[in-house]
Structures are given as structure tokens and as C-alpha cells.
Image (cartoon, rainbow, N blue to C red):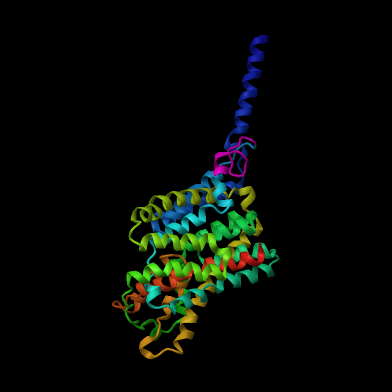
Amino acid sequence: MEFSGGFFDFLTHHLKQFIEYTAFSNMTIGHIIMIIVGLVFITLAITKEYEPLLLVPIGFGMIIGNIPFYPGLQIGIYEQGSVLNYLYFGVINGVYPPLIFLGIGAMTDFSALISNPKLMLIGAAAQLGIFGAYMLALLLGFSPEQAGAIGIIGGADGPTAIFLTSKLAPELMGAIAVSAYSYMALVPVIQPPIMKLLTTKKERLIRMKPPRAVSKTEKILFPILGILLTCFIVPSGLPLLGMLFFGNLLKESTVTNRLAETARGPLIDIVTILIGLTVGASTQANTFLTTRSLSIFALGAISFVIATFGGVMFCKFINLFLSKDNKINPLIGNAGVSAVPDSARVSQMIGLQYDKTNHLLMHAMGPNVAGVIGSAVAAGILLSFLY
């Protein structure tokens, strides 16, 4: 009987211990909410095709990060020594964003911008969202460093947001990264109503001159001159801008095709998987579901609205000084945010709704790629006086 009683106690103790280690025993309503959010992200990516390369990894990462576990097992993303924590190192220390920029540079054609340099100004005007959100974040009581990290959401550039946040406010990384990538994916939903509200039917029908042909020499000189001009002004943007222009030189030189293919193919795909999955996993309910996170999401939405407003209204402003034959269709102003190429596709989509023969995509790519440069420059400016 003693043996059977001891064996029973042994079984009971270990069964109780096993139950304590299950996710069911450690589940909270917050974990359930975040798992549902992850499922929504995956659903939007698959059914609506909203940035699936980003939302699928982030959504699945949310599920991984919100399966509750017994503390101390070294499996959570915030537990030192865990595998997820090692992978998250590239996010929290800003390693992944420059590699993403290398790939972006290797896949980007700057011809539309080179052929019409004034489109660079539209990309700059759209960065208004960054500084608008920065001011609002300060008013809400965030520190200057935190406000700068929140403001960069308005640049519609996930890697830039991660890079700047890793330097200024790593404690806000989860909320800012998820907010930036979420709004990037929702560009086709957020921007069209603003574009239609700010433009007249006559303005939407403006036909722009076809961009001129750009020579190979111009394409090769652009990344070299680009890094010299931007990084001499804002050296703190060097990690992002340097990799962006280096990737573009690999593409345009045509003598490093293997390197360019690697940068815009396998390399950027691997880094996208790692950055998406770990950013998603960083949304653990106990650290993510806070009033501060909700405030960041609200500010992110406002910054996107301000950025779109700035780009469209600047086109209308600059048209006051252009001849009738050289006017810019203000529908391309939204593309000044650097969600490449989705915001440019939105310009094309809205333009075709009013004129089936008016293709704005090539024109919109000018401010779109300018927005990539502009957001990196803005991040460098914020870093230079807040770090």
C-alpha cells in the first residue's frame, strides 16, 4: 500500500507539474486577443493580398509569440539565451534593416526620378507625416527619443522604423514595428479616400508627359552622387543610405549581376522572413497590450494621413508654378510615402478609375523611390539630434 500510495503521489505531482507547463494553464485573455490579431493578419494577406510577404510572417510570429509558456524555459523572445532571442538580436540592434535596404537598392529603378528630378520634392513633402507625428507624440507625453521613433512610422518604411527605434526607443520596438508594417500593408485602404478628398476631377485627369529615356551613365552615377550628397549632409543615415545606393550600383553597373541577384533575391527574402517572424513574436501580450501601444497605433494612422496629405497638397502647390503642359497629376503625391511599390500602384489604380488610358505608375515611381531616400534621410536627421 505504501508503494502504491507513493507511486500515486509521484504521478499526481508530475501530472500537476505537466499541467502547469501547458499553454492552457498560462493563458490570459491578452494572449487570445493577440492570436486573433495574428490570424486576422494572415487572413488579410491571403484573401486580400495585402503585403503577404510581410503580413504572413508577422501574423504567424504573433501566434508564436502569444502561445503562453511557463517562465524560465528559455523559449520566449525576451528570454536571454533562447533561439528566438538570438534571432531578435538583428531587430533590436538594427542589423536587419540595412540588409533590407541593400535588397531594395538592387531591385529599384531610379529612372523615373532621374528623368524628372523635381519629383524628389514630392517625396520630401510626404515626410511631413514623420515630423507631424513627432510633435503629436511629444504632446501626448512621450520622451523626445520615443517621439522620434514613433514619428518615423509616417515614412511608411518598416526597415527604417526598426532601425531608428533600435537606436532611440528599443522598449517600443514591438508596437512601432507592427504599426509601421500594418499601415504599409493597408496603404490601398488608407490612401484612396484622402486622395479623392483633396483633388478635383479635373486634377485627376491631368496627363503627364512620358518620362525621358535615361542613359546607363546617368544610372551608374546616380547612386555614387546620391550617397555623397545625402550622407555628407546626414552622416547618421549612412547604414541605410549606404546600403541602398550600394545595392543600386550593383544593379546598374551590370558587371555585378550575381551580387545584385543575391541581394534582391535570396538575401532580402531570408531577412524578410526573420524580421517579420521576430517582430510578430515580439508582440507578447504581457508586454505589448498596453495603453502606450494603442497610442502608438493611433499616432501611426495619423502620421500616414499627414504624409499622404503632404504629398498630394505639395503637387497642387507646385502646379501653381508650372505651365499647363508640365503640370503634375496630384494623384501621384500619395506615392511620396516609401511603401514601394504599393503606394505607386494606388496612384495608378485611382488614376485609371477616372481615365482608363492615363497610366500614372511610371510617374508615381519617381516620388515613391524618393520617399525611400527621404525617409532614410529623415531618420538620420532625427538620430543626429536625439541619439
Quadrant in which residue 332 is drawn: bottom left
The percent position of residue 376, horizontal first and vertical second, equals: 53, 65
Does the image show residue 218?
yes
Quarter of the image with the N terminus in it: top right
The one of 88 and 24 positioned closer to us in this rendering = 88
Within the magenta stretch, is there residue 315?
no
Number of dots carrying numbers: 0
Q: Nearer the viewer, residue 63 or 134?
A: 134
The location of residue 51, given as percent across then percent down, is: 43, 58
Q: Which is the main secondary structure of the residues drawn in magenta?
A: loop
Please tell me which residue lies in front, 9 or 209. 209
Residue 244: horizontal and vertical position, in percent?
46, 62
Q: Position of residue 176 (x, y in %)?
A: 58, 59
Give above or below for 202 relative to 65. Answer: below
Residue plotted at (68% across, 68% down): 138
Residue 300 in view of the camera: no
Q: Is residue 340 left or right of residue 165?
A: left
Task: Please state the extent of the stretch shown in magenta in the rendering.
Answer: 72-86
Query: Picture quarter containing residue 162?
Result: bottom right
Q: Nearer the viewer, residue 301 or 154?
A: 154
Asked if 112 appears above or below 179 in the picture, the reply is below
